[in-house]
Image (spheres, rainbow, N blue to C red):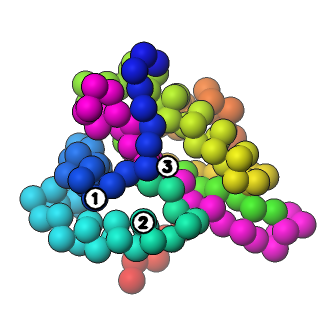
Amino acid sequence: MNDLTIRRATSDDLSAIVAMLADDPLGATRESPDDLTPYLTAFARIDGDPHQHLVVAERAGRTIGTLQLTVVPGLSRKGSTRTIIEGVRIHADERGTGLGSELITWAIDRSRELGADLVQLTSDATRTDAHRFYERLGFVQSHFGFKLAL
């Protein structure tokens, strides 16, 4: 994509990131863009962890996408390292432009650079459009996910 930059997020990006997280039916019920305090705390933990790669996509100085890539060393699969893609969001007026594919391709390439043998992600069961998107990019539905709120 022309003039697109994918770079490590800074705390100055939080307002734009949280706005994108909140800009969908699920995010609208669980995010609070008016109070960045908890996000600043979380950002400090993420930024201080070398296994976390929170990035933004930027064009013409405007933050238009984000994702978080987590590196997970493991014992299974003969000691394989995997990465997990989380929090993929594209600004509403950039959806359908190919930016999502560009971000996921960046995450896959970065995963290879980091020595990962497997890239995985989860997507809420209600996000059927996202499921088709990930399948088009070569991801295969392979597991059932479970959560326990604490």
What residue is drawn where x is 71% and y is 47%?
A: 113
Q: Select label 3 or label 2 by which is in front.
A: 2
Mark with earlier residue (1, 3): 1
Q: Residue furthest right?
A: 78
Q: Which residue is mark 1?
A: 11
Q: Residue furthest left?
A: 34
What residue is drawn where x is 40% and y is 21%?
A: 3
The circle drawn on residue 47 is: 2
Q: Label 3 vs label 2: CA separation?
A: 24 Å
| Residue type, label 2 | Asp
Q: How many marks?
A: 3
Determine the image quadrant of residue 80: bottom right
Percent x, y for residue 147?
49, 70
Q: Residues within 10 Å of mark 3 (few under 14, many from 20)?
A: some
Q: Residues within 10 Å of mark 2 (few under 14, many from 20)?
A: some
Determine the image quadrant of residue 74: bottom right
Q: Are marks 3 and 2 in contact (CB under 8 Å)?
A: no
Q: Main secondary structure of the magenta part?
A: strand
Q: Are marks 1 and 2 in contact (CB under 8 Å)?
A: yes
**Secondary structure beneath label 2:** helix
Percent x, y for residue 27?
27, 52
The circle drawn on residue 123 is: 3
